[in-house]
Image (cartoon, grey):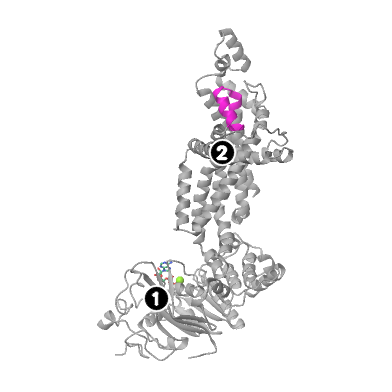
Amino acid sequence: MTNDKKLLSVNNLSVTFGTGDNPFTAVDRISYDVDAGEVLGIVGESGSGKSVSSLALMGLIDFPGKVRADSLTFEHTNLIGLSENARRKITGDEIAMIFQDPMTSLNPSFTVGNQIMEAIEVHQGGSKKERRAKAIDLLQQVGIPAPESRIDSYPHQLSGGMSQRVMIAMAIACDPKLLIADEPTTALDVTIQAQIIELLLKLQREKNMGLILITHDLALVAEAADRVVVMYAGQIVETGPANEIFKAPRHPYTQALMNSLPESAEGHDRLKALPGVVPGALDRPQGCLLNPRCPYATDRCRVEEPGYYGPEGRQSKCFYPLDDNGRPTQ
Amino acid sequence: MLYFILRRIGMVIPTFIGVSLFAFALIHLIPGDPVTVMGGERGMTATERAELEAMLGLDKPIWVQYFQYIGNVLQGDLGTSYVSREPVMSEFLTLFPATIELTVCAAIFASVVGLTLGILAAVRRGGLLDHTVMTISLTGYSMPIFWWGLLLMLLFSVNLGWTPVSGRMDVIYWIDEVTGFMLIDTLLSDEEGAFTAAVQHLILPSIVLGTIPMAVIARMTRSSMLEVLGEDYIRTARAKGLSKRRIIVKHALRNALIPVITVMGLQVGLLLSGAILTETIFAWPGIGKWLVESISRRDYPVVQGGLLLIATIIILVNLLVDLMYGVVNPRVRHSK
Ligand SMILES: Nc1ncnc2c1ncn2[C@@H]1O[C@H](COP(=O)(O)OP(=O)(O)O)[C@@H](O)[C@H]1O
Ligand SMILES: [Mg+2]
C-alpha cells in the first residue's frame, strides 16, 4: 500500500449540498490516487461531480456545501485536518488549479502581470523586480509572444487561448507538485484546444508535476492520461490504466462513453448508446445509479447498489463487469 | 477617451437649456410677485408699482424676459438680487462654501458608512449583521429628512446637549473668513476651541443630509459585492491561496465599486437638493437657506440664478463621476 511516488491519496471523499434531512450528494465516497509526475484523467458527462470533487481538493467548497473524507493525503499531510490558514499555504502553492472559462477566470480590473505576480508574492515573496522578471519568464514558458509588453495587458485585451495560457502561467508560478485542470479547453476554439493540451502536457513533463486532467472528452484522455477515473452521478464507476480501459472497458457507462466517440459511433448523438441524462438532486434512482439508462440492467441493479469489483487499480462498480468482448458477465 | 469626454460635454448643453427654462417658468408660475412683496404691509400706488415693474423689467412679455435673461447669463451676468441689490453671483460665491462644507461632510459620512456597511453585509450574507444593515438602510432610505433632522436635534442637542442646536459657529468666536470653509478657517485662526466647535456644528447636519445617500450606497454596495463574490475570478483568487481579506479588499471591491461609483455620483444631486431642507432645519447659512428665503421673497434673479448654478454643479459632478468610472474600469478607458 505504501508508495513513495504517491502524491495525493483521496479516500472516500464526499461532498453534499443543502442542509436539512435530504442533502444532495454531489460527490459520493470517491477514492483515487495520483502519483508524482502522473497524468490522471477524470472523465464523465456534465453533472458527474468532476468539478465539485476537485474544488473540494482545493478547499473551495463553501457553505452550504459540506466536504467529508476519511483522508485527503497530500505528501503525507492530511488536508482534512488542517486549519484554514495552513490549507491556504498549500493551495495555489503546491496544488494549483485552472478552470474551464479563462475569459471570466481572470480579474478584469488588474493586469495579467499583477495577477501572476500576486501568486508569487503570497507564497514566495521576493522583490517586485524579481517577481516581475519571474512573471515574464512564466509568460514565456506558456508561449505568450512578447511577454515583456503582454505582462501589462488587461484580460479583456487577450483572446481566450491567451487567457488560458495566462491562467496556466499563474497556476505554475509557484511550481506546484499537483496541477488540476478542470475542462481547460471546453470554452476554447477547437483549433486552440490541442495547443493548450500540448502545452499542459509539456509543462507537466518538464516539471514532473502530477496532473489531474478533467474532461468529458474521452478521446483526449485516451491520448494524454496514464490512468483514468470514470465518474457518473457523483460516483467513480471505473478506474484503471488508460490503455487497458480503452482496450476493454469493464463498466457499461465507460463502454457507452466510448461508443459515443466520433470514430466508433455511426450516429452523431452524444451517448447514443445511453439515452437520458445524469440524474440530478431529485431523480436519483435506487440501486445502481446508472440502471435507468443501462442496457444491461437487471432487477438486482434496480434495488442493490454494486460494490467495486476487479483487481486493485482496475476496478469497476458493476455487478456484471463487461468482458474483453464487451459483453456483461453473469 | 477624448471622444468619450467630448460626447459627455456635448450632452451638457441641452440639459442646461432645459434647466434654465424650467427654473424660469417655475418661479413665474407660483402665485405672488416681487413687487407686491416689496410693497409690504403698506402696499403701493399704481404708478409706484408701474415704475418699479419697469425698473425690474417685469413689464415686458414673459418670453422677452426669458431671452433677455439667457442673453445676460451667457455673458456671465446672473443679475442682481431684488432684495440685497448684490450681484447674484457674488452672493452665491459667499454662501457656497458653507453648502460645500456641509455637502462634502455628508458625502464622506454617506460613503464611508455606506461602503463599510454594504461590504460587511455582503461578506456576512444572511447573518445578523446583514439583516441589521438591510433594516437600517431601508429605514434610512424612507426617513423624511425634516422629521429625521428634528428627531436627532431633539435627542442630541436639546436632551443630551452634546451638539449645538443650529448654525455653523458659536457667536463667541470671531473667525476671519479666509477660505469660507469653517473647518479650515478655524484652524487658521488663533481662537482656541473654535475648530472643535465647528466640527460639533457639522456633525448632525452631515448625518441628516447623508442618511439617504448612505442607505442607497449601502444597499448598492451589498448587492454589487454579492454579485462580484460569485464571479469566476474570485474562485481563481481563492485557488491562489489568497487571504479572505485580500480577496475582498483587492479582487472583489475593485470590481464591485464600479456600479457603486455611478450611484454615488447620482447622490450628489440628491445631496444638493437635500441640503436645501437640511440647511433650513439647522439654520445653516448656505445656498439652500438662501434659496428658500428668496423664494418666499419672490427674488426672481436669485432663485433662477441659484438653481442654474446648482444644476451646473450637479452636471459637472456627474461628468467627473463618469470620468472616474473610466479610471476604475479599464474596459471603459480603452474603448473609443
Ligand atoms: N454550489 C452547488 N450547490 C448545489 N449543487 C451543486 C453546486 N455545485 C454543483 N452542484 C451540483 O453537483 C453536481 C455535480 O456538479 P459538477 O461537479 O459541476 O459536475 P461536472 O463538473 O462533472 O460537470 C451537479 O448536479 C450540480 O448541479
Ligand atoms: Mg465541471
Depth-wise, is mark 2 or mark 1 nearer the camera? 2
User: Image check: A190 left or right of A320?
Assistant: right
- Work out which residue is located at the far left of the displayed protein and give it: A299
Split into 4 quadrants, where in the image is the C terminus of chain A?
Answer: bottom left
Q: Is residue A207 visible?
A: yes
Question: Which residue does the numbered mark 1 point to in the structure image?
Answer: A234
Asked if residue B243 is positioned above or below residue B223 in the image, the reply reads below
Q: Is residue B75 visible?
A: no
Asked if residue A115 is positioned above or below residue B329 in the image, the reply reads below
Letter of the chain that mark 2 sits on in the rendering:
B
Q: Cα distance, mark 2 to mark 1?
A: 66 Å
Prevailing SS of the magenta stretch: helix
> Identity of the amino acid at label 1?
Gly
> Identity of the amino acid at label 2?
Gly
Whether residue B302 is in magenta: the answer is yes
Q: Ligand 2 is found in which quarter of the picture?
A: bottom left
Label 1 secondary element: loop
Extent of the magenta region: B283-303
Question: Which residue does the numbered mark 2 point to in the structure image?
Answer: B161
Q: Is mark 1 within 8 Å of ligand 1?
A: yes
